[in-house]
Image (tube, helix red, strand yellow):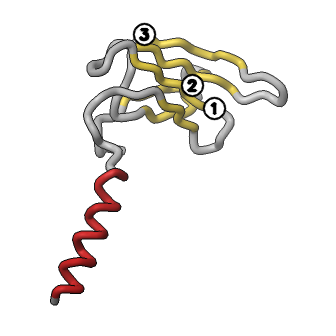
Amino acid sequence: MKLFVLGVAILAGFAAPARADEPGSRPYVHSGADGVLYARCVPDQVTGSAGRTRVYNVGRDTDDLIETYDWYAQGGVRLGWSPAAGKVAVMARRNGEC
């Protein structure tokens, strides 16, 4: 029983730092499903939606900036192609939602 409790305590100690939902905004990059487009999201503040989201098209030598948005999504973004509009679609995610 003591070994079981010790094992659970050790696992809990390793799992705690791996949490991705810690408070505070951080810069991140999110790729679309095909890997051709990606969003670079940088906050202006520690919390909130102030910041910039820039969407790039991956090139052989350099990446091309497609769109710039004046917001930051702390929960992440989803990228997709809108055939009707003929351009990339970007949607802000809430924490834990797809």
Query: Which mark is first along the chain, 1 or 2?
Result: 1
Dot in front, 2 or 3: 3
Name the amino acid type tagged 2: Val
Q: Position of residue 68 (x, y in %)?
A: 53, 12
Dot in front, 2 or 1: 1
Q: Residue furthest bottom?
A: 1
Q: CA distance from mark 2 to mark 3?
A: 16 Å
Badge 2 density bin: few <14, some 14–19, many ≥20, Cα 10 Å: some
Q: Is residue 70 above or below residue 83?
A: above
Say which element carries label 3: loop
- Along the line of sight, which residue is nearer the eye, 61 or 67? 61
Q: Position of residue 65 (x, y in %)?
A: 65, 16
Q: Residue 40 occupies which quadrant of the picture?
A: top right
Residue matched to label 2: 88
Query: Which mark is first along the chain, 3 or 2?
Result: 3
Q: Position of residue 56 (x, y in %)?
A: 64, 23
User: Mark 3–mark 1 contact, CB under 8 Å?
Assistant: no
User: Mark 2–mark 3 contact, CB under 8 Å?
Assistant: no
Residue matched to label 3: 70
